[in-house]
Image (cartoon, rainbow, N blue to C red):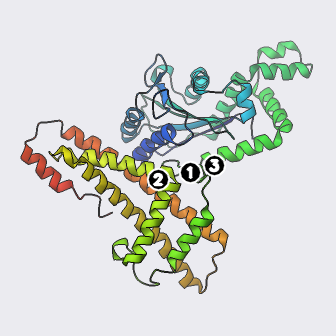
Amino acid sequence: MSILMYKQRFRPPNYKKTPKCNYAHIRYIATRPGASKNEGMRHGLFGKLEPGELIEFESWQEVAKEVRELSYKKVNIFRSIISFAPKTAEELGLKDHNSWEEYIERHIGVLAIKNGISQKNLAWACAHHNEASHPHIHIVFWDKNQKTMKNFVKPQIADSIRIQLIKETFTERIEAFLLKKDQNKNELKVITDEIVKEFDDNMKSMYPKEYKRLKELVGDIDVDELSDIQINQFLEGINLSTLSVRLFQLKEKMPKKGRLYYQLLEGDVKDEVDGLIADLKKDIPHIQALIEEYAEVKANLAMLYDTDPENLVKHREKAVIEMDKLIANKLLRVIKGILNKEYESNRFEFNEGRRVFYTNQMISEILLMLEQNVSDIDSEYEIRNKAMGTELSKRARKELYLRNKDKGMEK
């Protein structure tokens, strides 16, 4: 627990999914609810890919693609976070997007030096998340000239970064703390790690509940999901008890044995599944947003092969139906798991807490699935778009379209 929380990690560069996960992480920090947006933009990503002035990127995709390509080359992409308690952030003047930009630009060098990255080879991107309970900033950084892949970084490095950030961020407060203790003024010239620890412990004792809560919140950020989705933020204001009741009522209408697939459901039951999916999209806007993003890219992908511009809407609608079907089968998979539990345990009791747990699990799996599909289709579009950059005959484009039009529906 500390007056300043710092966390750092990276996905192993040799893992197969690391490039896609790093791409998805950039999208997450730049666009998730609560991200402080750049003026006139739909995302909040800023930073430096080259030495020079800090810039607010025109699109988060340009950074995400850069990170993905470097990940394929086994370059370590470090993910870190700096977080303060609300009162501390206010005292530091970290009240808006610009103030966070200035803060991280002053201190990004600490992250580089401690990780052995020279300033000329440092590239980084950030997004400020204006959470009322724990304002924080996500930083993604890497060494553009990295020669050797790293599989492990000592925990002491992250701790040394935290200590140095405290030194630089709270210099005046540490000096005031020392003066209050009647220390010799000469000691103020060098703020040692021991003094920082003493100052940090003192702040902790003054505001124990505040910093304990901060530790819990930052710990929640550290959940290592596919794209770092924080499920709690998307469920604020959602009555999971009501959703869980509907899920378990639907369970009672399902066959107790055999496979559960959307296309095999009878009409009335299928209508209820459709209704539950419609309400999920309405109640959890992030689900709807991911579906729309997928549909837009999928339609653009189809139009690389289709020569009729009037078909754009049709391709978009088809992609939405595809996603709805995937969500339906994910929902049915959760129901099947519940039915298996009942069968194995013989009258297994599902109290309200367990019903909510299964509902939460279902929504988490839906979000992760949608994130992965959006990431995949975006990669597919980029590759195909490059391939289509060369001149193809109308016949060749049509053949490509016919070969690819139903791709993905079998998922």
Residue that mark 3 sits on: 220
Residue that mark 2 sits on: 287
Q: Residue at x 82, y 33 (%)?
A: 203
Residue that mark 1 sits on: 234
Give the Cα distance between marks 3 and 2: 21 Å
Name the outermost residue toward the bottom: 346
Amino acid at dot 3: Asp
Q: Residue at x 58, y 29 (%)?
A: 111
Q: Residue at x 28, y 44 (%)?
A: 381
Q: Position of residue 216 (x, y in %)?
A: 70, 47
Mark 3 or mark 1: whose residue is earlier in sequence: 3
The residue mark sitting in front, 3 or 2, is 2
Residue 15: in sight, yes or no?
Answer: no
- Quick check: 157 left or right of 78? right
- Quick check: 347 left or right of 213? left
Q: Residues within 10 Å of mark 1 (few under 14, many from 20)?
A: some
**Secondary element at image label 1:** helix
Give the Cα distance between marks 3 and 1: 14 Å
Q: Residue at x 25, y 57 (%)?
A: 407
Give the Cα distance between marks 1 and 2: 9 Å
The residue mark sitting in front, 3 or 1, is 1
Amino acid at dot 2: Ile
